[in-house]
Image (tube, helix red, strand yellow):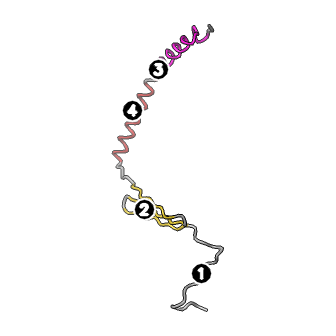
Amino acid sequence: MGHGIDQPPEQPSPTRRLIATGTRLRLGTRTITVRATLAGVTGTIRTHAAIDQAAKARVAELHRACRADYQAAAPSRAKVDHVVGAILLAAAGFRSYGGGR
């Protein structure tokens, strides 16, 4: 028989139950997410920053400049590493990298 207006709908089978429900809503640059479980309700609001192409280009140029600076300083870092290594070995009683005591 069909359900009348006064009769509630059939209940779901006890073997099937709702574990979680949720929704996601985008409002401009914000995303609102809500999730409900038996343990409670959680939610997040995330903002998506709108970065223009000029700003992305400036950041990329800054990264290129930093990379070039790092690569140009590589010989200096190698010298410092060599000197520091020699000092540490001398402090430990070694005369050179190849020699013993």
The quadrant holding residue 67 is: top left
Residue 65's disc is: 4
Residue that mark 3 sits on: 75
Residue that mark 2 sits on: 32
Q: Between residues 62 and 12, which one lies in front from this camera angle?
A: 12
Residue 11's disc is: 1
Secondary structure character of the magenta stretch overall: helix
Q: Are marks 2 and 1 in contact (CB under 8 Å)?
A: no
Q: Is residue 13 above or below residue 57?
A: below
| Magenta range | 77-98
The nearer-to-camera label among 1 and 3 is: 1
Q: Between residues 68 and 27, which one lies in front from this camera angle?
A: 27
Disc 1 secondary structure class: loop
What residue do we see at 63% from left, 73% from top?
16
N-term-proximal mark, 4 vs 1: 1
Q: Is residue 58 magenta?
A: no
What residue do we see at 44% from left, 59% from top?
44
Alpha carbon separation for disc pair 4 and 2: 38 Å
The nearer-to-camera label among 3 and 2 is: 2
The amino acid sitting under disc 1 is Gln
Q: Between residues 36 and 53, which one lies in front from this camera angle?
A: 36
State the image coordinates of residue 28 (x, y, percent, origin top left): 36, 61
Q: Quadrant of the C terminus?
A: top right
The amino acid sitting under disc 2 is Ile
